Amino acid sequence: MPPKKIKVLQVMIYMEGGGNEAVVVNLQKELPQHITFDYVLAHPAARRNVVQELGSTVHVMPPEMCSPTRWATFVKQIVQEHHYDIVHFHRFAFGGKIMKAVKQAGVTGRIAHAHGTASQETFLKNMLYFPYHWTINRWLLIKHATNIIGCSSDALRFMMGPFAHHPKCRVILNAIPIDIFAKKVASTPKAELCQRYGVPTDVPVIGTFGRLDVGKNHEFLLRIFERLTGTSVLFIGGEGQQREKLEQIRDQLPFPDRICMVGHCTDVPELLGNLFDCFVLPSKSEGFGISVIEAVAAGLYVVCSDKIPKDVTGAFSDRITALPLSAPLERWAEAVEDAIQRRIPPEQGLELVRNSPMNFDRFVEEIVKMYETGVP
């Protein structure tokens, strides 16, 4: 007898090419046939074509519903109309209200997924939201969710605080599909990538990926690059609200032509494996840091902030230097220059990740088991 079909509604709100979104899309590609994903995204639903091409229906929130206080109402309506078995919520704000709403709608599997270790809201919104989140929201999650998971121990503690040890809570570490990643790494030679992005072929390339927002701390990265003693190129992939400000800072530096801000990249594995010489991520906060795992898999040495969860930095301590953001910029610059010299062949990096706790087969198995046990 074939397994029962399971319809999962992924409530992402935004899909802008971040690491967490990539993890969900990679998961969808490896699902058994009896499990299907649809999505709730905010308007405008950026990059929704990525999951539509996989056969998913995308429910786009109308503008008047694009508020954390109204998400629950919209999601409940979608669930009642389309009869989903599982609702998997991937945001920090107001998850408890959504879990309560979909429980009332008859959803048997209700999953809240923690991906962050800090709020990206304004100071005023945080002053209004946080007392609610630290008290009522956590209580609602414990009462109405069937599973509460964190992509790292830090992310779970941030969302649930003293409730992180509740039986409903556990950590499922993010992962990348190594075999697929390996094929992409090998697909594009360096000369072609240099020509594609206008990067010189004879200088080291220091790379990073991430949304251009305050949390990713690109301004700090520019200040580090300013202090490097050798000739190199800084490659910044990503889009976001900070782009104009970062371009202004870049243009004031003595060598703006050596800083490439290329926007959103679809060829991340190729760039990591064939163009970059090291990877730098000075984030102010990270729920996991999937780009760090990708960089290690590509053979790069990583310099990052100590805000990257220890689940990640501890697993690859021989390939990562994690520094406090309070450390002098000169110390960061020295670490980056050292990292350039410590690149290893991608084949070795791939094996490190394949044999780590971030094994993708294990990740898929745990999520699928959670879906299957959430449906009577």
Image (cartoon, rainbow, N blue to C red):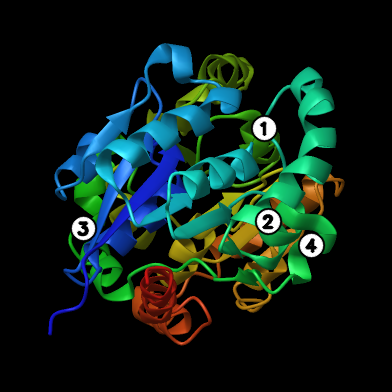
Q: Earlier in the sequence, mark 2 or mark 4?
A: 2
Classify 10 Å Cα crowding around label 3: few (below 14), some (14-19), many (20 and above). some
Q: Earlier in the sequence, mark 1 or mark 2?
A: 1
Residue occupying image coordinates x 70% and y 37%: 119
Q: Position of residue 156 (x, y in %)?
A: 69, 60
Question: Label 1 belongs to which residue?
Answer: 120
Marks 1/3: CA–CA distance = 37 Å
Marks 2/4: CA–CA distance = 11 Å
Residue occupying image coordinates x 29% and y 66%: 181
Secondary element under disc 3, as helix, strand or loop, is loop
Classify 10 Å Cα crowding around label 1: few (below 14), some (14-19), many (20 and above). few
Marks 1/2: CA–CA distance = 26 Å
Q: Amino acid at mark 4?
A: Phe
The number of callouts visible is: 4
Classify 10 Å Cα crowding around label 2: few (below 14), some (14-19), many (20 and above). few
Q: Pointer 1 and pointer 2: residues touching (CB < 8 Å)?
A: no
Question: Label 2 belongs to which residue?
Answer: 143
Question: Label 4 belongs to which residue?
Answer: 163
Q: Earlier in the sequence, mark 1 or mark 3?
A: 1
